[in-house]
Image (spheres, helix red, strand yellow):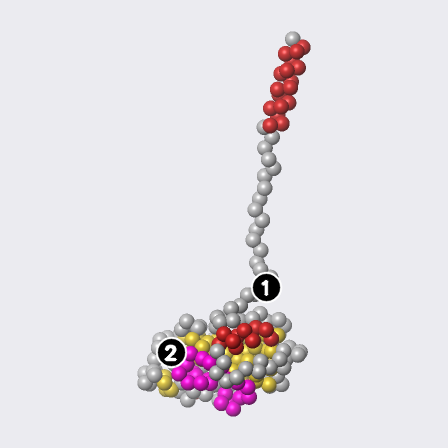
Amino acid sequence: MKRILALTAAVLILTGCTGTSAPETTMAEPTEPTGVATSSADPSATAPDATGGFAVSSPDFADGEDLPDSATASAFGGQCTGDNTNPGFEFAGVPDGTAAFAITMIDRSASNFVHWVHGDIPGDAAGIESGGSADLAGFEGETMAPEAGYFGPCPPGPDHRYEFTVYALDAPLGLADGVGFAEFKSAVDDHTLAVATITGMRSGPAT
């Protein structure tokens, strides 16, 4: 009888060991990346604002409101009939070490149609004068527009969103007129201290 009891106890001990389940594990929640990756050829990509204080405003329109008639182009057989003069801009909270600025204008409602690329604006500039794009220091980059330099809105339909992005740079880019957008954006990404944007709206076609 003692031998039977001993064998029964051994069996119970072994059964208890092999029947123990593994501890429950949980999958860790994915975390957001700490860096921001941008494509040098993607007009929709902008660098992060490194200061949080850099801002751009305009005396000619409020953020999210309509651009003035004078800012529209005169093109495409009367689809738009403006003076093609750039709006003015004022910079605030410019970060220390800013040696130059660059600006782009992109229609976010038309597959990121690039309207304006201008770089190496002097770093001591307080802004850009209304209608002053032709005399602006620096270089003009390649756009998708039929004309070089600033090319104003000329939308075929309603509610097009034109984003003006100003980059504060730690050094001039030293690029030539007509530089492609990919090369321009790659150089900008290497020298950006801060970014500020303002958006204007336009609807078309002209009637």
Viewer-nearest residue: 160 or 61: 160
**Whole-percent x and y of residue 196?**
56, 75
At label 1, counting other C-alpha atoms closer than 10 Å, the crowd grade (few under 14, some 14-19, many 20 or more) is few
Magenta stretch encompasses residue 135: yes
- Give the residue drawn at x 62%, y 23%: 14
Q: Position of residue 155 (x, y in %)?
A: 38, 78
Front residue of 113/164: it is: 113
Q: For the residue marked with disc 1, what is the amino acid?
A: Gly
Give the x, y percent position of residue 16.
61, 25
Q: In the rendered image, which quarter contains the N terminus? A: top right
Q: In terms of depth relative to the viewer, which is nearer, 12 or 81? A: 12
Pointer 1 residue: 35
Q: Give the residue pinned by disc 2.
A: 155
Quick one: quadrant of the C terminus?
bottom left
Q: Nearer the viewer, mark 1 or mark 2?
A: 1
Q: In the rendering, which numbered label is found on residue 60?
A: none
Residue found at the very far top of the displayed protein: 1
Q: Are marks 1 and 2 in contact (CB under 8 Å)?
A: no
> In which quarter of the view is residue 168 placed?
bottom right
Q: What residue do we see at 56% from left, 65% from top? A: 36
Q: What is the C-alpha distance between the residues marked 1 and 2?
A: 35 Å
Q: Secondary structure at mark 2?
A: loop
Can you name the residue that lies furthest to the bottom here?
Answer: 135
Residues shaded magenta: 132-153
The number of callouts visible is: 2
Residue 67 at x, y percent in the picture: 45, 81
Q: Is residue 104 magenta?
A: no
SS for tag 1?
Answer: loop
Q: What residue lies at 58% left-to-right and 80% top-to-bottom?
A: 173
Q: Main secondary structure of the magenta part?
A: loop
Residue at position x 48%, y 76% in the image: 181
**Residue 140 appears left or right of 93:** left
